[in-house]
Image (cartoon, rainbow, N blue to C red):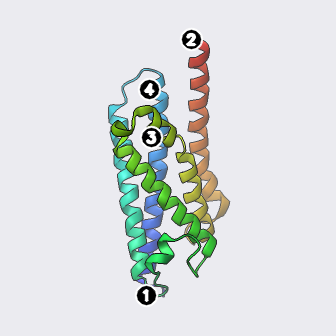
Amino acid sequence: MESLEWYAIRATGLVAYLLLYLAALTGLYSTVQKKRKKKINGILHFHEVLSDWAFIMTCGHLGILLIDSYFPFKLSELFIPFASGYETIPMAIGTFAFYFLILTMITSKFRRNIGFQRWRKLHALNPILYILVTLHGLLSGSDFPGMVLAAVNILPIMMMAGWFLLSKNRLTEAR
């Protein structure tokens, strides 16, 4: 029988991923709606709340890894890429994803201080975060069964990104 910690690790990882997925969808949707000159305050607030909870669940995921009785990780194994003796590459990808998430959270919370244009350029790199988290789940997570689940999760994001690019091109052509 698997331990309670193992279930909690998997649950927090999956919930964090789902929240990040929904944050990505709402972020792309709000961008498209903004281009169409529609009000987006509510959807932006929802996007920020989803992102905050994705971060909280990710921290919970890491915290439970530290107390897992089957394979307790050391702080260095969680925060230094390639330091883990367990699933080295997937764990390193997860570490890089966590750092990317921290960068995203900090720059978003301080976007007024760093300027909108600089924030927007940094925020445009977030597909990298989503790809890293997806790879981490595919390569290390036993509850992330293969390419079918990845396709189900990635396809709507790609569709929203395509929708965004098409609407951006239409607006550029209209000017």
Q: Element under label 4?
A: helix
Judge whether 40 appears above or below 145 on screen.
above
**Residue at image mark 3:** 26
Q: Amino acid type of disc 3? A: Thr
Q: Which label number is shown at residue 34?
A: 4
**Residue at image mark 1:** 69
Determine the CA span between mark 1 and mark 4: 48 Å
**Residue at image mark 2:** 175
Q: Element under label 2?
A: loop
Determine the CA span between mark 1 and mark 2: 61 Å
Q: Residue at x 44, y 68 (%)?
A: 11
Q: Amino acid type of disc 1? A: Ser
Find residue 93 and report its horizontal and vertical position in percent: 58, 64
Displayed quadrant of residue 125: top right
Dot 4 or dot 3: first in sequence order is 3
Q: Nearer the viewer, residue 125 or 72?
A: 125
Q: Which label number is shown at residue 40?
A: none
Local crowd size for mark 1, using a 10 Å CA cut-off: few (<14), some (14–19), many (≥20)? few
Q: Element under label 3?
A: helix
Determine the CA span between mark 2 and mark 3: 26 Å
Q: Are marks 3 and 1 in contact (CB under 8 Å)?
A: no
Judge whether 130 appears above or below 31 on screen.
below
